[in-house]
Amino acid sequence: MVKHSQAWLAMRSKTCALTLLALLSLSTLTLLFLRTTSDSCTQPQVRNLDALQPRTDSKLPNPLEFMKSKLVLMVSHELSLSGGPLLLMELAFLLRSAGSDVVRITNQKPPKPDDVIYTLENKMLDRGVQVVDARGEKAVDTARNADLVILNTAVAGKWLDAVLKEKVLEVLPKVLWWIHEMRGHYFKVEYVKHLPFVAGAMIDSHTTAEYWKNRTRERLGIKMPETYVVHLGNSKELMEVAEDSVAKRVLREHVRQSLGVRNDDLLFAIINSVSRGKGQDLFLRSFYESLMLIQEKKLQVPSLHAIVVGSDMNAQTKFETELRQFVMEKKIQDRVHFVNKTLAVAPYLASIDVLVQNSQARGECFGRITIEAMAFRLPVLGTAAGGTVEIVVNRTTGLLHPVGKEGVTPLAKNIVNLATHVERRLTMGKKGYERVKERFLEPHMAQRIALVLKEVLRKGSHN
């Protein structure tokens, strides 16, 4: 086991500048439009923005400059290192760069001081984002005076009635509801009863948008508001690291050294918070099976290693204990490495050879780590579900496998496939990088999300 902080301190003296870049490994978003029709039973119509080819010239004016001096309130159910809260923070920074006044509130906080919350709140304060109490009078006043209110995740809907009370109807017409969830237990009236009355919903993939449209109608009998499908995109900071060969080489050497892995070993990494839904257990079973296949067929390949980034060594959950027990039982401790969850994914993307995106059930709502890996010219082995199928082009930028136990052997075979075909691995990585440059960059996001915010602001002003 290796803690990220230990690895990072070891390289700090030589790579201070690169470290700062890596710690800024944040994503923003690109978007495609999806409009629902007035009849909730009809299929949503997609507004085709593929013809929009935004220029990446840094001298062009910021397309979000119309947000200058606008007051934006952001409401999140929690503040953690998970995808939704971090994405909202990144959007806050983007709006701050356009001159918006941004206020962030977190509806649920632990009773005791939390190091992660302390770090993230100070990061926001340093970038000019105001952090206020979720249930104070200031939160209510800010919601009433804001030009735009962004609710982040379905669970954040509980804040509306709990805090705004009788003033909720006054605020709903200027709410943009950003939804990331794909699990059925989020479809509760107490969470989303106000959903039909907000200015719009923003969802991370077409698959998820369709799921929400059908599920809300069938289970709750409510209609989705006008819906925009939002794909994530890579920040300029991450792309700078991904396109800097010297930075990547230094990061690769130091991380591999900290893990006790040689330069010519092959590293397959899964980078998600450790939980059953992310599929780390099935990935480790596939990894073990791939080792058995290589041994059985007497294949000549470099030494294979699996890295699980997203561990929580303090929590010691039952699921993570099961993962470690499996590794012990199969006697592959020298091949599997657990790394604490971290904001700084760039060092690990620079050090590995293949990313595994193994989210189960309906898959990832989007999975921004996938496009971050592609920026580093890494092929992706992903489940054929959720947003992954909207990112990975099967057999071109990676290989897809089924979810569940049925996917264990196909993933094992795909691991062996890329381990034994160097040129295929490199070609897929190159194609993935080209796909990122075509559609998953910050300039793509900036021009397209501007259209969404303009529409939401227009609706809010009319009401």
Image (tube, grey):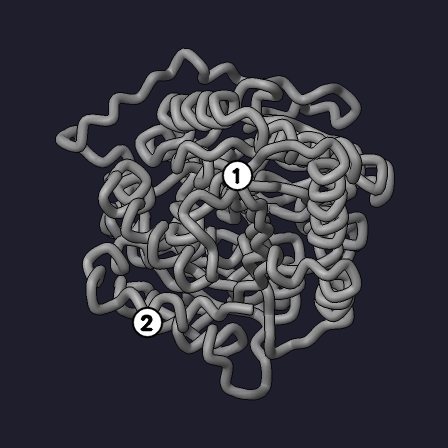
Q: Nearer the viewer, residue 74 or 229?
A: 229
Quick check: 430 left or right of 249? Answer: right
Q: Callout 2: helix, strand or loop?
A: helix
Inspect the image, locate mark 2, and give the three-letter code of the amino acid beneath it. Answer: Leu
The residue drawn where x is 38% and y is 50% is 346
For mark 2, what is the residue?
9
Q: Nearer the viewer, residue 90 or 304?
A: 304
Mark 2 surroundings: few (<14), some (14-19) or many (≥20) residues within 10 A: few
For mark 1, what is the residue?
354
Is residue 385 in view? no
Number of numbered discs on residues: 2
Residue farthest along the bottom direction in this orientation: 112
The residue drawn where x is 17% and y is 32% is 58
Quick check: 237 left or right of 327? Answer: left
Q: Quadrant of residue 36?
A: top right
Inspect the image, locate mark 1, and give the three-letter code of the amino acid beneath it. Answer: Val
The CA distance from mark 1 to mark 2 is: 25 Å
Q: Give x and y (percent) for residue 408.
A: 78, 39
Above or below for 189 versus 387? below
Q: Give x and y (percent) for residue 405.
A: 84, 41
- The quadrant in which the N terminus is found is bottom right
Quick check: 285 left or right of 247? Answer: right
- Label ID, residue 143: none
The residue drawn where x is 56% and y is 45% is 303
Quick check: 158 left or right of 167? Answer: right
